[in-house]
Structures are given as structure tokens and as C-alpha cells.
Amino acid sequence: MNILIMEDEYSLADALAEKLKSEKFNVCIKTNGEDGEDEALTESYDLILLDVMLPKKNGFEILKYLKQEKIKTPIIMLTAKSEIEDKLNGLEHGADDYITKPFSMRELMARVKAVLKRTNNIENTDYLEFGDISLDLKNAKLKSCENEIQLSGKELEIMEQLLLNKNQILSRESLLERIWGYDSDAEYNNIEVYITFIRRKLKLIESKVGIKAVRGIGYKLEKMEGKNKNDK
Ligand code: CA
């Protein structure tokens, strides 16, 4: 699981990172709002810890923007203030939880785990959908309006990741890490090969959904008008 920390107090950010790493999370720290927001928009995370008072762009502005951009990553706000307005402001704009500084690492871990459990449960569905396709996770079938096709294990996993991150670019690094794991020898070529297979299957079921390659970064699902472009 990948966690993004946006926190400008270096000592706190480091302490959070250390604790999360000890619990087997992968962690990225950004110490100003602009960098943090960019990171949240371009990489896929399972959770964001978002400080309110940040240089360049504050936590509430970031929260609002990420929600506006339909980023579904759960967000826990961190703040020094304990005022009720701050809490309401955060929750109103879609934060999943809220924790007031100073907090203990134990309390933080409890919140992190609770939010991950809750949000995973919500997404724990048998079908994922985008455009005219629906992915049947139980039976590994990709369906369009009128057709369906069986996916192999890796194709299913890749398609699942693309659908779970349908509003953002899924980087090749996160795909490799999530599907083949950190210590694997799998390379970017593997991903390209499977993406080619999946594009062929999308074409076979006559779907209007395509997989767009974002040069040097990764992949994103797109809805295509008119004829199918999965012939590459
Ligand atoms: Ca701060």
C-alpha cells in the first residue's frame, strides 16, 4: 500500500514515514502543497495524510481540488488546530477523517487502518465499470454492451488497476510494483505486452474504451468516439 504524506514539519514527516514503513507501507513525503498536489494527481496512492497549514497551497485548497478532479484516494487531514470549524471544513469537502496534532503514532495508525478498511470495503465490489465496459472480477471477464471475453490472470490484475485508477494516469512503476511486486525481475516490456493483449481484447468485444499510453509515464483509460483505436 502506498501512502502520500504532505507535511512541512520535517521531523513529523520523518517520524510518520518511519512508523508507516515499519508497518510495511510505501511512503512518499512532499513538504509543500504544490508538489504534494502534483504528486497526488499523477501517481496513485491508497491514502493521503494531508497537513492543513502547508506552504504554497494549503490542505483545504488541495482537498477541494483533488475532489474536484475526482481523485478517490482517501484523505486524512492533519492539523495543529483543534477548532471545530476546521474539522467541519475538512469533512465537508470530502476528507475521510481528521486527526489533531499532537497525536500519538498509535492513534494515527488506528485511523489509517480504519480508513483503509472502510474505503476498501466500499470498493470491494464484484464489478468495476468505465465507459461501455464492465470488469467481472470474480469470473475474470471483460464485458462490453453486447460481448464478453475471458481475461488471463495478469490481464485481469492490470485491468483492475486501470479501472480502480480510472481518473488518473497509472504509472508503469506502480503497475509493476502492484502486480509483480517489489522484488520481481519483471520489466516494463511485460506491461507493454499485456497492454497489447488487453487492447486486442477490447477490440474483439467492440468496446469504445481504449488504453492511452502517456509517454514516459504510464497508462490511462479513455473513452473513444467513433471507431475503435485498439488496433496497435
Ligand atoms: Ca504545517
Image: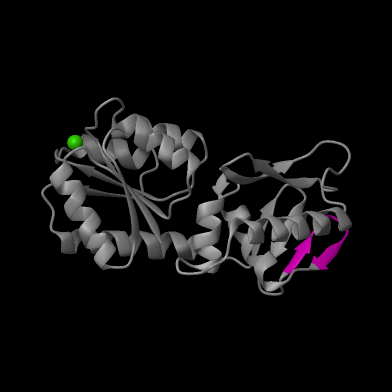
Q: What is the image's colouring?
A: one colour
Magenta highlight on residue 177: no
Query: Does residue 14 appear to the left or right of 125 in the view shown?
Result: left
Q: Quadrant of residue 143?
A: bottom right
Residue 144 shows in this picture: no
**What residue is at 33 percent from the left and 63 percent from the top?**
114
Query: Does residue 7 appear to the left or right of 197 in the view shown?
Result: left
Magenta-highlighted residues: 141-149
Residue reaching furthest left? Answer: 102
Residue 2 shows in this picture: yes
Query: Does residue 123 appear to the left or right of 224 in the view shown?
Result: left
Query: Does residue 179 appear to the left or right of 83 in the view shown?
Result: right
**What residue is at 43 percent from the left and 32 percent from the top?**
65
Residue 218 drawn at (x, y percent) = 59, 46
Tell me if residue 136 comes above or below residue 92 in the rendering.
below
Foreground pick, 26 / 149:
26
Residue 10 drawn at (x, y percent) = 17, 42
Q: In which quarter of the image is residue 157?
A: bottom right
Tell me if residue 119 comes above or below residue 92 in the rendering.
below
Tell me if residue 172 comes above or below residue 154 in the rendering.
above
Magenta highlight on residue 146: yes
Foreground pick, 15 / 100:
15
State how many labels appear. 0
Quadrant for the N terminus in the image: bottom left
**What residue is at 40 percent from the left and 42 percent from the top?**
94
Foreground pick, 29 / 164:
29
Residue 148 drawn at (x, y percent) = 83, 64
Q: Quadrant of ligand 1?
A: top left
